[in-house]
Amino acid sequence: GEDVEQSLFLSVREGDSSVINCTYTDSSSTYLYWYKQEPGAGLQLLTYIFSNMDMKQDQRLTVLLNKKDKHLSLRIADTQTGDSAIYFCAEREDNTDKLIFGTGTRLQVFP
Amino acid sequence: GAGVSQSPSNKVTEKGKDVELRCDPISGHTALYWYRQSLGQGLEFLIYFQGNSAPDKSGLPSDRFSAERTGGSVSTLTIQRTQQEDSAVYLCASSLLGGVQFFGPGTRLTVL
């Protein structure tokens, strides 16, 4: 079955870049997503990328997709304390539309 | 409404009781999903409604779980005879057909 993996924890200094990595297994996924979850809150969509793209940039966020290696990354430039949260990558099952989530990466930003 | 809403935000119940969780999707969204977030299992899919099609129930963990969607809009997730392992945050999402899923704030269920 599908499996999405992420590292559990990342700590960065304010102002530095953060890179959160994700690997997935379903090569037929057409969309891959990044969601952010702050404490006690639901999931907020950050960005997504279509599988025929290798890169997508949206303000401070850059998503890179390596389809050959089934590797997805999210880069946050100039990381701020407000970026501290759990970040989930997710792949969408092509024939069902349900999302398969990674374990989530807890990003901690320190001054 | 502006986004997906869920109620209640918190629910504490005793083992063996039934609970109902409600989801109001974004107006016009034809697809509605339920997911569960728990410490041991992470985020897992439960059930999916799309228009008038039969729901995809493949993620429901047991026959104590059921869901319905009335009039193609509001959905209710029912858990019968709750167990302690049902304690989790239940998240609802909605989307246009094949579109991005937008999530509600979730219902935190605690079974004592």
Image (cartoon, coloured by chain):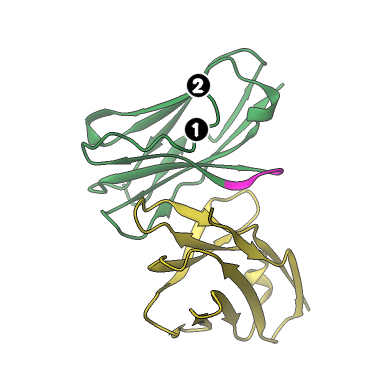
| Residue at mark 2: chain | B
Reply above or below: A11 against A98.
Answer: below
Q: Amino acid at mark 1?
A: Leu
Q: Position of residue A78 (x, y in %)?
A: 63, 86
Looking at the rendered structure, the number of numbered marks drawn on it comes to 2
- The residue carrying mark 2 is B63
**Residue in view at x 75 percent, y 67 percent:** A9
Say the numbered circle drawn on residue A9. none
* SS at mark 1 in the image: loop
Residue B32: quarter of image? top left
Quadrant (top left, top right, bottom left, bottom right) of the C terminus of chain A? bottom right
How packed is label 1: few (under 14 Cα within 10 Å), some, or many (20 or more)? some
Colour in which chain B is shown? Answer: green
Q: Position of residue B5 (x, y in %)?
A: 41, 42
Q: Amino acid at mark 2?
A: Asp
| Horizontal arrangement in the rendering, residue B64 relative to residue A56 (left or right) | right
Q: Relative to the observer, which residue lies in front, B56 or A81?
A: B56
Q: What's the distance in space between the residues labelled 1 and 2, CA to CA?
A: 7 Å
- The residue carrying mark 1 is B60
Colour in which chain A is shown? Answer: yellow
Q: Main SS type for the magenta part?
A: loop
| Residues in magenta, as a range | B39-43
